[in-house]
Amino acid sequence: MTRVRENKAMPAMTPDKDSPRILIVRIGAMGDVLHALPAVAALRVQLSAAHIGWAIEPRWASLLTAQTQQGSPLVDRIHHVPVQAWKAKPLSMATARSILALRRELRAEQYDIAVDLQGTIRSSFVGKLAGAKIFTGSTNPRETPARIFYTQKIALQQPHVVEQACEILGAAVGLPLVPATPVLAQDAAAEAWCNGVLAALPDSARIVVLSAGGGWGAKRWPSERFGALAAALTKNGCKVFVAAASVEDDLAHRVVESSAGTAQNIVCDLPQLTALLRRASLCIAGDTGPLHLAAAVGTPVVGIYGPTDPARNGPYTPHKSMLRSPQSTTDHSRHSAPEAGLLSITVQDVINSAMGLLQP
């Protein structure tokens, strides 16, 4: 039986001399991957010779082209974990073959350490596939059964998930880690696309990007309010874009309709959204990936929060205004209706925050 160690880290490694092989497991989603990047950036600065792999859903893999402030790549190897395909056909031979292929791929890298920064049954299973001697995760992961595979469990002390990732990863390698700011890569094709979108706007245009989505209904501020917000911002001289994942994005369409035509729906993939947010003056959204992406590229953000706590998983940036009602209580239950505290946040509340950040 494997003996579980509580909060016992490896002996400290000597930066720039030791070269451990480390697997990061953070499969998704966008905001969570972005919250894990500062810890890995800090690791790369401390252990520049380390071989760092990352297991991730293919749709988020472009985020891993990020670099440190010194220009070093964060990740040496990306392992695609096709979760959506597995979920669609969980008992199929194709899924079994895919899992076995991933296992072979991970074991071929001979990782010394695996680190679960997600804390789910799925992520701990993927980490276990690597066969690393040391597998580190939280004492209290998001899904309790994930603990069964960990050989090293870390009791978290810090409030924010970015800092918690540093705690877990730092304990795994025996080094104190402080979040470092990653630099997201620029995609040439996406930048050219963005140039075309913005070509008709004056250089002085204040671009605001709205995102009405969220992982589940309780986190979603009503699309009609986003529409009213867009109309008000337009009156204040802003150009408002509504980010849409596809032409069928119903939430984005409802925001544009509610804006009386003042907002523009814009369908973009992840590199294109990154390019657009990099040019924006402000992003306004609930607790969803685009909000964290905007923060990661240095764009000011207004976060509209309800059942999730921004003190734990809000944008990790000083350039922000977080709105959350005292009525809100932290609850990750996936209710379909907007949470009552979230609904108490008015359009005027958001306008006031937005205009405060837009002031020169």
Image (cartoon, rainbow, N blue to C red):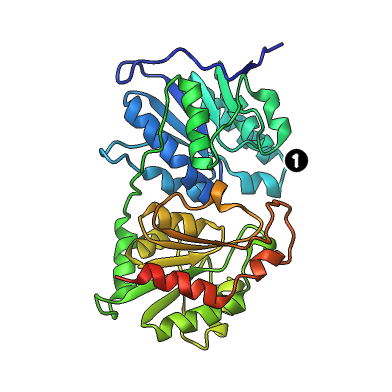
Q: Quadrant of residue 337?
A: bottom right
Residue at image x 53%, y 41%?
161
Residue 108 visible: no
Question: Image check: 347 left or right of 207?
Answer: right
| Residue 304 shows in this picture | yes
Lateral position of residue 29 relative to residue 92, left or right? left
Q: Is residue 38 above or below residue 240?
A: above
Is residue 341 left or right of 110 when viewed as pictured?
right
Q: Nearer the viewer, residue 15 or 247?
A: 15
**What residue sits 42% from the left and 15% below the top?**
12
Q: Tell me the SS state at disc 1.
A: loop
The quarter of the displayed image where residue 38 is located: top left
Residue assigned mark 1: 91
Residue 1: where, in percent of width, then height? 72, 11
Q: Amino acid at mark 1?
A: Leu
Q: Is residue 184 above or below residue 210?
A: above
Q: Position of residue 299 (x, y in %)?
A: 37, 60
Q: Residue at x 51, y 46 (%)?
A: 58
Q: Please provide percent x and percent y for residue 319.
A: 39, 57
